[in-house]
Amino acid sequence: MAKRTARIFSGAPVVTAFMFDDTALSERNLSVKVFTEPTAEWALFVLNNRNRDFRDHADSDSNHDNKYDIVSGPVANDDIALLFRTFANGYIGIEALVEGMKHRKLSDQYSFHTDHSITYLTKTEVVSCE
């Protein structure tokens, strides 16, 4: 991804690595949303947050307003993009979407949304990818 981004925008491809102690997820001063597996709630959360026209920011299925400092859960990667588009276009229902995701190998991610949340990151290294 670093090489692709550097080609598009010019510059040198670099990856910065960080450590995160996930025990911080239970701290009271952080607002955290955790998805342990792909579910209907997770799928709607992903779709709502990718939709620039979504306006119900108070909805718990949205983080446009950064109500959650950190969101943790499966990565909605390119492998399931077609499945999401099929649902968004009304060709399949939410149940079929969730069932289709169960057969995919998805890795997990942490998404940091506020200045406060990134204070829990520790920079470990910067690697040139040239």
Image (cartoon, rainbow, N blue to C red):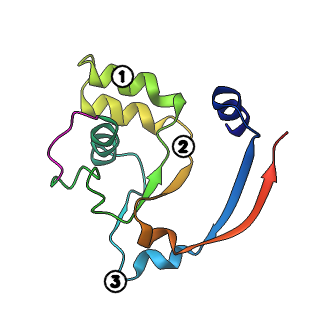
Q: What residue is pinned by disc 2?
A: 106
Q: Which residue lies at the image location 81% right of the left edge and 43% below the top edge?
A: 129
Q: Within 10 angstroms of label 3, few (less than 14), some, or many (20 or more) residues?
A: few
Give left or right: position of 1 versus 95.
right
**Image location of residue 73, percent across then percent down:** 45, 54
Give the total of numbered labels.
3
Q: Which residue lies at the image location 32% right of the left edge and 71% below the top edge?
A: 31
Give the image quarter of residue 46.
top left
**Dot 1 and dot 3 residues touching (CB under 8 Å):** no
Give left or right: position of 12 versus 113.
right
**Image location of residue 59, percent across then percent down:** 16, 52
Between marks 3 and 2, how big is the CA–CA gap? 29 Å
> Taking 125 as reference, is 119 above or below it?
below
Locate the N terminus by quadrant: top right
Q: Which residues are magenta?
A: 52-57
Between marks 1 and 3, how big is the CA–CA gap? 36 Å
Q: Which residue lies at the image location 34% right of the left edge and 19% below the top edge?
A: 86
Q: Is residue 121 magenta?
A: no
**Dot 3 and dot 2 residues touching (CB under 8 Å):** no
> Taking 65 as reference, is 47 above or below it?
above
Q: Secondary structure at mark 3?
A: loop
Q: Observer-nearest residue: 113 or 34?
A: 113
**Image location of residue 104, percent across then percent down:** 52, 35
Specify the amino acid type for callout 2: Leu
Q: Which mark is residue 28?
A: 3
Specify the amino acid type for callout 1: Arg
**Label 3 vs label 2, nearer the camera:** 3
Q: Residue furthest right?
A: 130
Q: What residue is pinned by disc 1?
A: 85
Specify the amino acid type for callout 3: Arg
